[in-house]
Image (cartoon, helix red, strand yellow):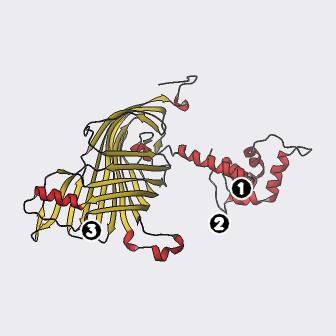
């Protein structure tokens, strides 16, 4: 039977606190655990508490859980090192702590699946609040099998397009989802882009879309970074159920999200290459940029604080639709700019602040043995200086299906070491 702790009338202290502050109760516990010669006898603390501390609760018409009393008592008599180990153990135990009315834990140790992943990216550059150019690389599609154990996945992927050696494009995305927190790692290195949209001035007239999806080699981006976020309602709301298929959401639930992020960016735009490109494709075009504007290199660090919300909607048996949105308040520090906490009032620049965001969406069918679904994530970042503004949008779309196997011990038949 489970008991709930109460509070005394006119006091904010719980009955647990009152009982454990009672010197006679503590003395009783110690006396029972001591032999006639002062030797400690083997005894279970929860049993002792039931004979010494419970009468105090009965007198106040209160009841508590034995494990709650034991936990509070033990914590009050720990050394610093014991407290550190105890806190570490409690933290890792949280990864497997669920409200089973809302979340069905993973029944299996291993996972095998096939997945198709599409990578997309788009940049918008606005120069002097007039000229604007939008560039994107070709969408990359990879397919491959994966085998996983817990958070570790190994696999081989085959790229279905852009298989020629001249494609200088390197992309890496890794997202890890646990019950408590999630983390995204990303890396991009690409100089193979196509011009998707162009708005320049020619003879005092706006010229748009003179070029149709042509390759342009004067733009190069390289960046890496991570986002780390905490799921506050992790006992009822499962992020892995929507994006990692390691648990099943049984009832709809939502949770606030909080986190931090960091990114390092190097973006290079060769305006002379753009001038030459336009002169080859537009009759009558004359160079627009001066010698000092021929090459623009933006090198900066981005520090972000995130906040948002995620919701899992169980709309049918074994079916889940999930969506989450986090907004980030980011501060961009360009190479050459100084910024120190001790001189924050002089170094801080309001123009370095940007509003960024990360969005996720997924739909999955999972009966604990088989699963299939699709998920997408989108990242948006902004960098702004007096002469140029850059908006970056990138993300992934995954379509997958697979099977869980190798039942965990609690779900195996008695006596079986392995059960598929």
Which picture quadrant has residue 125?
Answer: bottom left
| 3D distance between C-alphas at marks 1 and 3 | 81 Å
Which picture quadrant has residue 305?
Answer: bottom left
Mark earlier in primary sequence (1, 3): 1
Say if mark 2 contacts mark 3, CB within 8 Å.
Answer: no
Q: Which residue does the numbered mark 3 point to in the structure image?
A: 292
Q: Is residue 23 left or right of residue 317?
A: right
Q: Is residue 179 left or right of residue 50?
A: left
- Secondary element at image label 3: helix
The furthest residue to the bottom:
346
Residue count near mark 3 (Cα–Cα under 10 Å), binned few <14, some 14–19, many ≥20:
few
Q: Nearer the viewer, residue 32 or 352?
A: 352
Task: Judge whether 176 appears above or below 123 on screen.
Answer: above
Q: Position of residue 242 (x, y in %)?
A: 39, 44
Q: Which residue does the numbered mark 2 point to in the structure image?
A: 12
Task: Judge whether 116 appears above or below 180 on screen.
Answer: above
Q: Nearer the viewer, residue 267 or 291?
A: 291
Task: Judge whether 6 appears above or below 108 on screen.
Answer: below
**In this view of the protein, can residue 68 be seen by the observer?**
no
Mark earlier in primary sequence (2, 1): 2
Disc 2 versus disc 3: nearer the observer: 3
Say if mark 1 contacts mark 3, CB within 8 Å.
Answer: no
| 3D distance between C-alphas at marks 2 and 3 | 69 Å
- Secondary element at image label 1: helix
Say if mark 2 contacts mark 1, CB within 8 Å.
Answer: no
Q: Position of residue 404 (x, y in %)?
A: 43, 31
Q: Residue at x 34, y 49 (%)?
A: 189
Q: Residue at x 30, y 55 (%)?
A: 393
Which numbered circle lies on residue 57?
1
Q: Is residue 88 left or right of residue 194?
A: right
Q: Nearer the viewer, residue 350 or 290?
A: 290
């Amino acid at each position: 039977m489970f008991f709930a702790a109460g509070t005394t009338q006119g006091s904010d202290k719980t009955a647990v606190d009152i009982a454990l502050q009672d010197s006679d109760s503590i003395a009783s516990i110690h006396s029972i655990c001591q032999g006639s010669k002062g030797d400690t006898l083997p005894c279970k603390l929860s049993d002792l508490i039931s004979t010494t501390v419970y009468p105090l609760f009965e007198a106040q018409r209160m009841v508590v859980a034995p494990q709650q009393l034991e936990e509070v008592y033990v914590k009050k008599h720990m050394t610093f090192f014991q407290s550190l180990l105890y806190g570490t153990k409690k933290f890792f135990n949280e990864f497997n702590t669920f409200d089973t009315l809302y979340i069905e834990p993973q029944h299996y140790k291993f996972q095998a699946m096939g997945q198709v992943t599409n990578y997309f990216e788009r940049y918008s550059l606005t120069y002097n609040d007039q000229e604007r150019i939008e560039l994107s690389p070709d969408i990359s599609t990879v397919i491959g099998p994966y085998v996983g154990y817990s958070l570790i996945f190994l696999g081989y992927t085959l790229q279905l397009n852009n298989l020629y050696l001249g494609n200088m494009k390197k992309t890496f995305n890794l997202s890890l989802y646990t019950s408590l927190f999630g983390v995204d790692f990303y890396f991009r290195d690409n100089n193979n882009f196509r011009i998707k949209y162009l708005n320049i001035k020619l003879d005092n007239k706006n010229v748009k879309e003179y070029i149709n999806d042509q390759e342009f080699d004067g733009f190069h981006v390289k960046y890496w970074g991570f986002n780390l976020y905490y799921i506050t309602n992790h006992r009822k709301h499962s992020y892995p159920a929507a994006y990692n298929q390691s648990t099943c959401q049984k009832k709809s639930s939502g949770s606030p999200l909080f986190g931090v992020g960091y990114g390092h960016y190097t973006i290079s735009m060769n305006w002379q290459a753009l001038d030459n490109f336009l002169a080859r494709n537009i009759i009558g075009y004359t160079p627009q940029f001066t010698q000092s504007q021929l090459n623009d290199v933006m090198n900066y660090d981005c520090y972000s604080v995130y906040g948002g919300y995620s919701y899992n909607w169980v709309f049918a048996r074994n079916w889940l639709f999930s969506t989450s949105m986090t907004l980030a308040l980011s501060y961009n520090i360009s190479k050459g700019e100084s910024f120190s906490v001790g001189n924050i009032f002089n170094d801080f620049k309001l123009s370095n602040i940007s509003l960024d965001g990360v969005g996720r969406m997924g739909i999955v069918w999972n009966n604990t043995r088989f699963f299939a679904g699709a998920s997408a994530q989108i990242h948006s970042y902004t960098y702004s200086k007096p002469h140029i503004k850059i908006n970056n949008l990138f993300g992934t779309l995954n379509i997958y299906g697979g099977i869980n196997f190798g039942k965990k011990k609690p779900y195996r038949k008695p006596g079986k070491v392995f059960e598929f």
